[in-house]
């Protein structure tokens, strides 16, 4: 009578963060171990989390990354205890740009703002563009000092956006109105007329003196 004793092999798994390893229909994460009979051929399916990729696969101290095909590593038949180490790394990022500009800094009345195209997957931006300053939004003004016949008045304008103020003079009431030349024209006309009368009188006097 022959008794054959099969001593199982222990497979130790050391799986880095951001991924898992499936072997023989069991999924493992972190540090784990299981037992399998000698001569077993195990297929390890290595699955990174979204945004990560397989960084390094080491089997019994040997880098077997080149033997990993489509996320699977087929180990040699077990001859004793084995160890699989897998690490994951953030997947190489390809920027995916948004279609529209995002305002990064709102323009104010006096300072320009900026906008840019943002990446959907990271903080990177491109095509940063200045947004012109808005300029003040003046209200219709409040008379703070009424003009008199002789003294100028004052009107105060306030920006409805930032509160900046601006003052403008109101001309005295007695000053000639601009845009209506009649009072000025009248004065000029009168001056001309009086000049002509004076000239005529002078000429007449000279004639008399000459006679
Ligand atoms: Zn990006
Ligand atoms: Zn303003």
Image (cartoon, rainbow, N blue to C red):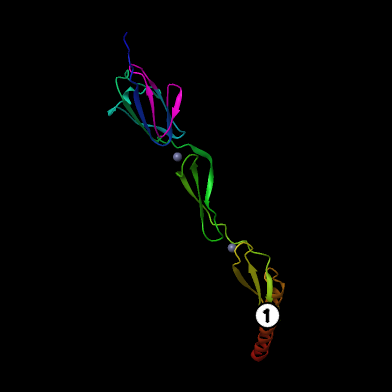
Residue at 54%, 57% in the rendered image: 133
Frontmost residue, 62 versus 9:
9
Residue at 54%, 56% in the rendered image: 107
Frontmost residue, 11 versus 30:
11
Residue 28 is covered by the magenta coloring: yes
Residue 10 is covered by the magenta coloring: no
In percent of width and height, residue 6 lies at 34, 17
- Number of numbered labels in the structure image: 1
In percent of width and height, residue 146 lies at 70, 78
Frontmost residue, 127 versus 181:
127
Q: In the figure, residue 182 lies in which quadrant?
A: bottom right
In this rendering, the answer to whether 29 lies above or below 194 is above
* Label 1 lies in ligand 2 vicinity (Cβ under 8 Å): no
In this rendering, the answer to whether 96 lies above or below 27 is below
Left or right: 71, with 210 as reference point: left
Residue at 66%, 85% in the rendered image: 203
In this rendering, the answer to whether 31 lies above or below 184 is above
In percent of width and height, residue 37 lies at 36, 19
Frontmost residue, 159 versus 192:
159
Q: In the orientation shown, which residue stands out farthest toward the left? A: 62
The image quadrant where one finds the N terminus is top left
> Where does the magenta region start and end?
22-43
* Within-10-Å neighbours for mark 1: few <14, some 14–19, many 20+: few
Q: Quadrant of ligand 1?
A: top left
In percent of width and height, residue 147 lies at 69, 78
In this rendering, the answer to whether 36 lies above or below 20 is above
Q: In the figure, residue 91 lies in which quadrant?
A: top left
Residue at 37%, 21% in the rendered image: 36
Left or right: 145, with 73 as reference point: right
Name the residue tied to disc 1. 191
**Mark 1: secondary structure:** helix
């Amino acid at each position: 009578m022959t008794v054959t004793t099969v001593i199982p092999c222990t497979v130790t798994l050391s799986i880095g963060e951001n991924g898992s390893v499936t072997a023989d229909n069991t999924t493992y994460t972190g540090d784990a171990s299981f037992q399998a009979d000698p001569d077993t051929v195990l297929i390890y399916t290595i699955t990174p989390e979204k945004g990560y990729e397989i960084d390094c696969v080491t089997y019994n101290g040997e880098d077997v990354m080149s033997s990993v095909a489509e996320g699977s590593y087929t180990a040699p038949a077990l001859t004793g205890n084995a160890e699989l180490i897998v690490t994951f790394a953030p997947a190489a990022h390809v920027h995916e740009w948004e279609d529209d500009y995002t305002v990064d800094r709102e323009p104010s009345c006096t300072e320009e703002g900026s906008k840019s195209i943002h990446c959907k997957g990271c903080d990177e931006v491109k095509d940063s563009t200045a947004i012109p300053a808005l300029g003040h939004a003046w209200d219709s003004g409040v008379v703070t000092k009424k003009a008199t016949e002789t003294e100028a008045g004052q009107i105060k304008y306030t920006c409805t956006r930032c509160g900046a103020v601006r003052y403008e003079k109101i001309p005295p009431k007695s000053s000639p109105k601009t845009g209506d030349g009649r009072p000025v024209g009248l004065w000029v006309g009168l001056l001309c007329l009086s000049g002509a009368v004076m000239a005529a009188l002078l000429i007449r006097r000279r004639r008399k003196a000459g006679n």
